[in-house]
Image (tube, helix red, strand yellow):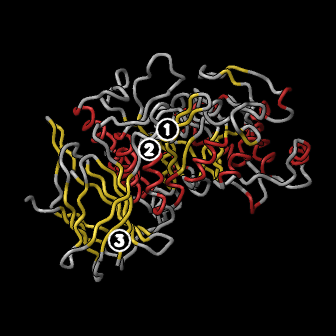
Amino acid sequence: AARPVSISIDAGKPGPVINKNVYGQFAEHLGTGVYEGMWVGPKSTIPNTRGWRNDVVGALKALHVPLVRWPGGCFADTYHWRDGIGPQHQRPSNVHANGSVDEFNAVGTHEFFDLIEMLGAEAYVNGNVGTGSVQEMADWVEYMTADGGSPLARLRARNGREKPFKVAYFGIGNELWGCGGNMKPEYYASLYSNYEHFLRAPAQSRPKMIASGSDTAWTEVLSKELKGRTIGISVHQYTVPTGNWDVKGKDLGFKEDEWISTLANTMKMDQMIKDHVAVLDRNDPKKTIGLMIDEWGTWYDEAAGRSALFQQNSLRDALVAALNFNIFHQHAERVPMTTIAQMVNVLQAMILTDKEKMVLTPTYYAFQMYVPFQDADSLPLAIKDNTSYTLGTVTIPGVSASAARARDGKLYLALVNTDPSRAVDVAVDVAGTKLQGAAGKVLTAAAMDAHNTFQHPQAIRPAPFSTRAAGGKLSIKVPAKAVMVVALEK
Ligand code: AHR
């Protein structure tokens, strides 16, 4: 028999906390991501609470979504917040620059915070630099955060909300190098400073400001110019199976070459983070600036007849999610936030809807299995004798792993087996501890593209898993193409 992969965890030397906001999500007014997917309006026959679908909100609550980024994306840089307040029937309809949404503004600031408060999540609001103004953005921040005396606080109260909203994070623009305005980093850095200067809020409720970045050249400029004015620089990193944006690859029905290329491409996240962190470590050695990966996930070719950026989501997406989680945990010190693109019906979604029907995707289940990692202490782990998985010219590690001590005091181990054909034995030890067993969940299926449909909503979901130590040794058999999260039992 092949030698097992060996994983040694040092529970005595906890690393940085894995910020719960690493498990954040992105909800943009795009396709059916917000309208239909989440918001159906209070008069809909689909059961809802003040317009938000009960089934979707319930599923998101079960996921302990810690943070939601809204309203975009590219949408944010064409969004004018005043269109989305006041009586619903008086709100304008407008087509936005990205053209994908006939925006009727039923979901605006108040509705978004209603959702946030139902979910118990933090709000990450993204402001409009591209087509807005400093005054418009300053007014929005004041409208959301000011108390009593301000005219905009009084307007908010007239619109039904006396108490300020809690804006945990505020993003100043999005993809300023592209859809946000084709800018150079130096120009944006000056603009950012001006915007940030005029965004006033009571000290105790001032949102934490986030700058929008791009590649390491942008991080170089922004981390030098914006120190003290930002708590983070956002970067976007999507996974395209073929690596070619013109022919990205299909969501389903792919062959093994696109299984491995997707996983290999997604694992480039690690090097991307390292490259940015090297710049940050040079320009910000006191680590005041985080790397906010506020758009990530798979992006496939769009099939005809579907809403914009709608794609199915298979077992492969669950592995993509888990591989990224394991990478984010390794960089917990500099990566305090990520928001996957996106929450519902858009790109690598948690949830898909079709009228009154809803399905949970394999990505949803990966997020659910990793809930114990939210706010857990990361633990150093060494992998020895790792297998590798090769197809053609591509080789990737067979096993990816991450360990942490969760808020419940237990030790958790996450394992991913990237090989679609071979199970792998993993020998686990925790220094100074005699392990008795492991128990948790495993997500796998017979097909690489196993997925849930509206006809078969439970085709793939996690199964319980447990194993006992034998002869003082804990060995875990991880099935082929699987994500597993277990609590280690002492
Ligand atoms: O997530 C979809 C789009 O991708 C976002 O609007 C934009 O920021 C990115 O290019």
Q: In this view, does 389 lie to the left or right of 143?
A: left
In this orientation, which residue lies closer to the viewer: 181 or 469?
469
Distance from Cα at disc 3 to Cα at disc 2: 23 Å
Which three-letter amino acid code belongs to the residue tagged 2? Thr
Q: In this view, does 120 lie to the left or right of 487?
A: right
Q: Is mark 1 on a helix, strand or loop?
A: loop
Do the residues under discs 2 and 1 have CB atoms within 8 angstroms?
yes
Q: Where is residue 7 in the image (x, y as percent from the top left)?
A: 24, 66
Which three-letter amino acid code belongs to the residue tagged 3? Leu
The N terminus - image quarter: bottom left
Q: Position of residue 450 (x, y in %)?
A: 35, 37
In this orientation, which residue lies closer to the viewer: 192 or 331?
331
State which tag comes first along the sequence, 3 or 1: 1
Which three-letter amino acid code belongs to the residue tagged 1? Ala
Where is mark 2, residue-wise?
363
At horizontal 44% and vertical 55% (from top left) the residue drawn is: 369
- Determine the residue located farthest toward the left in the rendered image: 1
In this orientation, which residue lies closer to the viewer: 160 or 362?
362
Residue 355, quarter of the rendered image: top right
Q: In this view, does 64 lie to the left or right of 163?
A: left
Q: Is residue 152 above or below residue 399?
A: above
Q: Residue 488 got which mark?
A: 3
Question: Which marked residue is nearer to the observer: mark 3 or mark 1?
Answer: 3
State which tag comes first along the sequence, 2 or 1: 1
- Determine the residue located farthest toward the bottom in the rendered image: 432
Q: Is mark 3 within 8 Å of ligand 1?
A: no
- On the question of residue 130 being in view, the answer is no
Where is mark 1, residue-wise?
349
Do the residues under discs 3 and 2 have CB atoms within 8 angstroms?
no
Do the residues under discs 3 and 1 have CB atoms within 8 angstroms?
no
At horizontal 52% and vertical 48% (from top left) the residue drawn is: 233
Mark 3 Cα shell of 10 Å, populated few (<14), some (14-19), many (≥20) = many
